[in-house]
Image: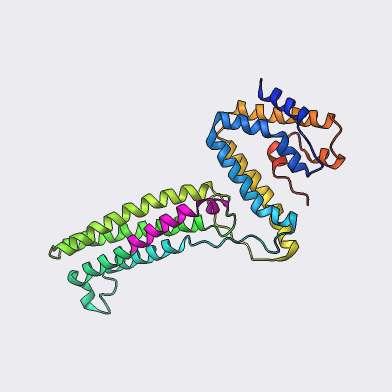
Amino acid sequence: MSTKETAVAHARSAELGPGSARSVARALQEPLLAAIGAADASVRERLELVDRSFAVWVDGWETGSRTAPWRPRLVTPWPDLVGMFAVGGAMGMAAAAGARSTPALDSLEVTAPTMVGFLTVAFAAIAIGAVVARREREVLLMQRDDSAAVTRSAFLWVGAVFSAMAVIAMAVRYASDEFFPIAVLASAMSVAGLIACTVLALDANRVARASAAGGKLRHRARGGGPAALRDEAIDASGDAREWAESVLSVLSPELRAELAEAYAAAVREAIARHVLPRDTEKRLQPRDWVAARYDVVR
């Protein structure tokens, strides 16, 4: 059976209760999700993440179980901030940033051991940051405002730039200063820091772009009360639609057209059964199944 035929058969037999238009639409869309999963399981998984993120923002308002907007408590990106400052300290030592005020800081015998100390702290911090970000990944993907994923990506990119500057500064120093083991170690750690920060920054950037924030850092004033929750639910609806469309964009145009046609046919079949309230029928939005999936009553 085609996706359209499966969707129509499902709409004909499914129990369509008096719930919201969104719940009815999602019930009708079960064959669509099955078709998406058959074509690309990763797309279905990402779409389910959009669903969970949407639920976090909207369910509390609709059920009255939350009195303030959702603000997750995360450790990310604070370890990465520490790492960025530590790499910056190593870069400053390599560039003899304090030599004018304290000439002793211009000595490689002082600079190299201090750099090793800074870089050791940096490696520990970014390693902790990577572990924490992995554990908090799903919440990071759900964040729409004040995205910790976007901020972490920025901190790591700055750390990579600082590491590159430290490598260059040490290379310049070697032209005039004498080599010794700790200086070589400091240079090697600077190169390792550049590689580690770059690799982690690329991964963090992928997470940030795949998140509900879309790789953009947006700030929203912290409000409270029913009005703030309602506004966030409405915004979450629009953001979820955009996010879902981005997720679905990797599917072939033919499959996307087939899904749209199958949903429209399922809606027509469900309405023909005369079991749905009039308002629900109007909100099923047969021309846009993604919009119906994230519908919010304003």
The residue sitting at 71% across, 59% down in the picture is 65
Residue at 75% x, 62% y: name it: 226
Q: Residue 3's x, y, as percent?
A: 66, 25
Q: Nearer the viewer, residue 173 or 29?
A: 29
**Where 154 falls versus 285 (above or below)?**
below
Of all residues, the one furthest to the top in this rendering is 1
Query: Considering the image in quadrants, where does the N terminus appear?
Result: top right
**Residue at point 62% right, 62% down?**
220
Q: Position of residue 46 (x, y in %)?
A: 56, 41
* Numbered disc total: 0
Instruction: Tell me where residue 20 sits by quadrant.
Output: top right
- Magenta stretch: give its range: 122-142
Tell me if residue 288 can be seen: no
Seen at 60% across and 42% down, the residue is 48
Magenta includes 133? yes
Whether residue 39 is visible to the viewer of this picture, yes or no, is yes
Most foreground residue, 114 or 124: 124
Relative to 12, residue 67 above or below: below
The image quadrant that residue 146 belongs to is: bottom right
Which residue occupies the foreground of this view, 298 or 35?
35
Residue 28 lies, in percent from the top left, at 72, 34
Tell me the chief SS of the magenta region. Answer: helix
